Image: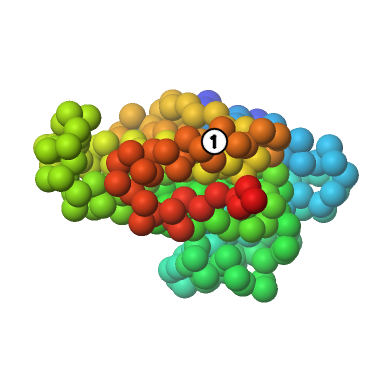
Amino acid sequence: MSIPDIRPEQSIELLKALHILTRDGKLNQDSRRKLKQVYHLFQFIEPLLLEAEGQGKPISLVDHGAGKSYLGFILYDLFFKSRSQPGHIYGIETRQELVTRSEELAARCGFGGMSFLNLSVADSIHSTQLPEQVSVVTALHACNTATDDAIRFALGKQAQSIVLVPCCQAEVASVLRQGKGAAIRRDALAEIWRHALHTREFGSHLTNVLRCLQLEAHGYQVTVTELVGWEHSMKNELIIARQGNHSPGRAIARLNEILDTFGLEDLRERFFVPDVH
């Protein structure tokens, strides 16, 4: 059966099990948008998986904040299950009921290369249930500092590629707010975040700038783009990092300069960089 908006190689039964399709194979507007989003992400992730596959090693992908694992199941269906080399997807999720549901679905579908772990992103960093190295790390709308934890995880696992759709992170805005009065008296630049709404928005933007510099400082090439089809969400920034930046010194210097300029020195541990000495 061929349904418009659905890839011909996609399992219809899987989409029904994920409740993207109704039992009679219909696609409503909300599900169509959800599927469009996942397919759009797949276009960015597939080349990263192919790069990893080209190195002749088993491919592994860790999806942080997996939720109902729409992305993981569709990635496995479209890419992993057809490969000659073994591969594995790990879904990290704090809600046990979603982990259990995903485990049951993977078993019904015969997707033996999928595992689901009831862990926070922070706890996954030290978990022995995950491999020492991974190919790709994804974190889509991991709230607050969970995106930063996913970056720390990816760096520790020497991930070849990292795909982030950052969510809210109030930590930087909070530090900006604390030093706002002194900053305004000292520097006209502080007018950028004087008003409360601007503090929040500028803090969010600055957080992602620091994340990109941190990734570059650790040897990644970073691209930032906008996700098409996520118009319902303000958080539609897509950060993709690939190993391959062989001159991270500038990124280290710039990151430290930004922390100093905006009074964010206390966040050096959050946005840690390699020791250049």
Query: Residue at horizontal 46%, vertical 40%?
Result: 255
Q: How is the image coloured?
A: rainbow
Tell me the element at label 1. Answer: helix
Q: Is 170 in front, or is 176?
A: 176
Q: Residues within 10 Å of mark 1 (few under 14, many from 20)?
A: many
Image spot of residue 182 (x, y percent): 15, 45
Which quadrant, please, contains the N terminus?
Answer: top right
Q: Is 180 in front, or is 222?
A: 180
| Residue type marked 1 | Ala
Q: Quadrant of residue 184?
A: top left
Image spot of residue 145 (x, y percent): 40, 56
Image spot of residue 163 (x, y percent): 56, 41
Image spot of residue 124 (x, y percent): 56, 67
Q: Quadrant of residue 228?
A: top left
Question: In the picture shown, does residue 129 fall above or below 157?
Answer: below
Q: Is residue 54 left or right of residue 44?
A: right
Query: Residue at horizontal 70%, vertical 44%?
Result: 160
Query: Residue at horizontal 67%, vertical 73%?
Result: 128
- Dot 1 corresponds to which residue? 251
Question: In the picture shown, does residue 62 fall above or below 233?
Answer: below
Q: Is residue 131 left or right of residue 239?
A: right
Q: Is residue 190 left or right of residue 257?
A: left
